Image: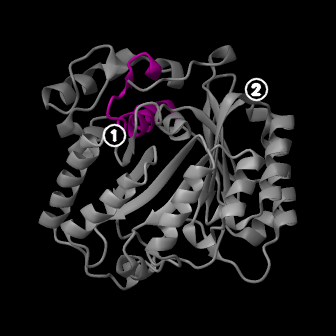
């Protein structure tokens, strides 16, 4: 069963930090993240200055807590130099403080890989790498607009494993243009052969405002997608991986702690262009806030671009949207701890969900059944 971090002082949830680096070498046709193809030199010093100013404006939300996890995503954060991260992390530790054994994850792409660059990230304080492979097949990588080859991906992961990071995640997609079940399973086999501790394995979806949405590629049929999912899940289970979240698999003890804090409705600061955060106040009010998406606007003034208080009547769905992504669910009392609401107020919805076979009958835990995970939208609609 996955660990649930204890509440901190004053009953506040654990605190994480998300850092967004918005630049990449080239915008992929499926990507709907806040990423922008870099033109000219990266403004590393200017962006670091803006991030630290952003942190200073967020300090009221810390409320005496230390950071339990940090996730640096993008874009392609590994475009930045190791000294950028060393200075950023030192400043964060000085301002907020780190929990003992903090998990610090950096997203990295094989196309920006150099062995010494990875070593520099480790020495700067990064403990965990998440490597955006997507596929090991060159034909699939070309269809996805990726800049690396399958061999480059293999060598990047092999080098990262040799550098003794606490954990390495492989980000792998399936259901790709022209991909058969055999090709998808071959990708998975190659990922497993490398010996990493964590896999994010998920199906390509076509999102609005992407090149693929404007010019859709030919994707596998539904029966092929089902075959990939079923056969892939069986292979992962046989390899000793735990399916702990909708698209996350790990060897025992290697679940991504940062993502667990999201799914367990913890708090997190968000800094960087387009970053989002969720903070619980001393009064118990829960607020989401976000920053300007465009890098230039963020560099000009990294303040809060928008904020929204989550209303009490919205909390059941907000909580369940996260908690029910976890295969093992969460302890039932976590709902009251993290929302301040009464679990009794959910009694009717929980009874309906259990009667429909979408949640287990365990009164001590909020756990989706296999049917509930398959029909998650229908389950969430009950709340």
Quadrant that contains the N terminus: top left
Q: Quadrant of residue 298?
A: bottom right
Residue found at x 62% / y 66%: 76
- Image check: 6 left or right of 231? right
Q: Is residue 31 above or below residue 316?
A: below
Q: Nearer the viewer, residue 243 or 357?
A: 243
Q: Earlier in the sequence, mark 1 or mark 2?
A: 2
Q: Which residue is mark 2?
A: 63
Q: Is residue 104 above or below residue 33?
A: above
Provide the secondary structure element on which disc 1 rests: loop
Residue found at x 70% / y 49%: 122
Question: Which residue is the extreme one toward the front?
Answer: 162
- Residue 10: in sight, yes or no? yes
Quadrant that contains the C terminus: top left
Q: Which residue is mark 1?
A: 241
Q: Nearer the viewer, residue 322 or 197?
A: 197
- Whole-percent x, y for residue 349 in the image: 27, 27
Residue found at x 36% / y 52%: 192
- Residue 32: in sight, yes or no? no
Magenta segment: 311-335
For mark 1, does the 10 Å Cα neighbourhood hold few (<14), some (14 to 19), or many (20 or more) residues? many
- Whole-percent x, y for residue 380 in the image: 30, 40
Q: Nearer the viewer, residue 311 or 83?
A: 83
Q: Is residue 66 above or below residue 298?
A: above
């Amino acid at each position: 069963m996955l660990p649930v971090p204890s509440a901190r002082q004053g009953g506040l949830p654990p605190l994480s930090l998300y850092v967004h680096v918005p630049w990449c070498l080239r915008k992929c046709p499926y990507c709907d993240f806040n990423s922008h193809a870099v033109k000219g030199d990266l403004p590393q010093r200017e962006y670091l200055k803006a991030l630290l100013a952003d942190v200073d404006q967020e300090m009221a939300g810390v409320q005496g807590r230390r950071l339990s996890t940090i996730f640096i995503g993008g874009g392609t954060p590994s475009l930045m130099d190791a000294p950028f991260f060393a200075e950023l992390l030192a400043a964060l530790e000085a301002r907020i403080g780190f929990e003992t054994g903090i998990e610090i994850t950096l997203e990295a792409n094989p196309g920006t890989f150099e062995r010494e660059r990875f070593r520099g990230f480790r020495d700067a304080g990064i403990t965990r790498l998440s490597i955006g492979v997507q596929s090991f097949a060159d034909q699939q990588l070309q269809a996805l607009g990726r800049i690396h080859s399958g061999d480059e991906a293999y060598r990047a992961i092999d080098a990262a494993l040799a550098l003794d990071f606490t954990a390495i995640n492989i980000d792998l997609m399936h259901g790709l243009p022209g991909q058969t079940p055999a090709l998808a399973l071959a990708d998975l086999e190659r990922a497993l052969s490398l010996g990493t501790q964590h896999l994010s394995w998920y199906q390509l979806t076509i999102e609005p405002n992407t090149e693929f949405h404007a010019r859709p590629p030919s994707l596998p049929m539904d029966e092929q997608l089902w075959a990939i999912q079923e056969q892939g899940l069986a292979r992962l289970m046989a390899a000793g991986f735990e399916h702990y979240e909708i698209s996350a698999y790990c060897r025992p003890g290697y679940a991504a702690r940062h993502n667990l804090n999201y799914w367990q409705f913890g708090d997190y600061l968000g800094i960087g262009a387009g970053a989002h955060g969720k903070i619980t106040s001393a009064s118990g009010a829960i607020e989401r806030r976000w920053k300007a998406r465009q890098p230039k606007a963020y560099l000009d003034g990294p303040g809060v671009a928008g904020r929204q208080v989550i209303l009490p009547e919205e909390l059941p769905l907000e909580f369940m949207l996260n908690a029910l992504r976890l295969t093992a669910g969460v302890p039932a009392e976590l709902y009251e701890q993290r929302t301040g609401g009464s679990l009794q107020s959910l009694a009717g919805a929980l009874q309906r969900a259990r009667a429909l076979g979408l949640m287990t009958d365990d009164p001590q835990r909020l756990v989706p059944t296999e049917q509930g995970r398959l029909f998650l939208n229908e389950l969430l609609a009950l709340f």
